[in-house]
Amino acid sequence: MNARRKVAKSWNVSDRTISDKYARQLYPKEKSSKVGKFRKALKSIEKDIKIPKPLHKTKNLN
């Protein structure tokens, strides 16, 4: 959990409303938010998972 999220959780607000600079002053040891890296990782995971295509409706399953 990064500094910005900790502040946001304690104030019950979205973590986007709090600046990284301010959050780092309160929690200097926490890492800064790495949203971009997380999103890139998600995209690569989505590529790896192959969703099976549904069978064509005209095919018989009997």
Image (cartoon, rainbow, N blue to C red):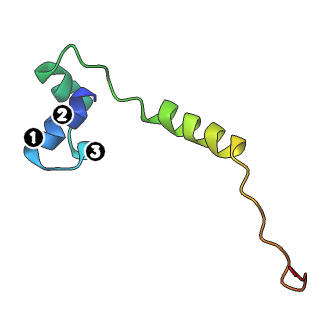
Q: Secondary structure at mark 2?
A: helix
Q: Which amino acid is tagged 1? A: Ser
Asked whether the residues under the numbered discs 1 and 2 touch, taking CB atoms below 8 Å apart as contact, a structural biologist would say yes
Residue at screen point 16% across, 28% down: 22
**Mark 3 vs mark 1, CA separation in Å:** 14 Å
Residue 59 x/y as whole percent: 90, 81
Q: Which mark is residue 6?
A: 2
| Amino acid type at image mark 3 | Arg
Task: Count residues near mark 3 (Cα–Cα under 10 Å), then give few for <14, some for 14-19, many for 20+.
Answer: few
The residue indicated by pointer 1 is 10
Residue at the image point whose x is 28% and y is 29% from the top: 1
Figure check: 5 above or below 12: above
Picture coordinates of residue 37, whole percent (x, y): 50, 30
- Quadrant containing the C terminus is bottom right
Q: Is residue 60 left or right of residue 26?
A: right
Q: Nearer the viewer, residue 45 or 38?
A: 45
Tell me the quarter of the picture where residue 60 sits. bottom right
Outermost residue, right side:
59
Q: Residues within 10 Å of mark 2 (few under 14, many from 20)?
A: some
Residue occupying the far bottom of the picture: 58
Of badges 3 and 2, the one in the foreground is 2
Mark closer to the chain start, 3 or 1 = 1
Which x, y percent locates residue 26?
Answer: 11, 23
Question: Disc 3 or 2, which lies upstream in sequence?
Answer: 2
* Res. 25 mark: none
How dense is the environment of label 1, judged by Cα within 10 Å: few (below 14), some, or many (20 and up)?
A: few
Find the distance from the CA under tag 1 to the CA under tag 2: 6 Å
SS at mark 1 in the image: helix
Looking at the picture, tell me which residue is in the foreground, 50 or 40.
50
Left or right of 47 on screen, residue 17: left
Which residue does the image show at 68% across and 46% down from the upper left?
A: 49
Kindly identify the amino acid type of the residue bearing the numbered disc 2: Lys
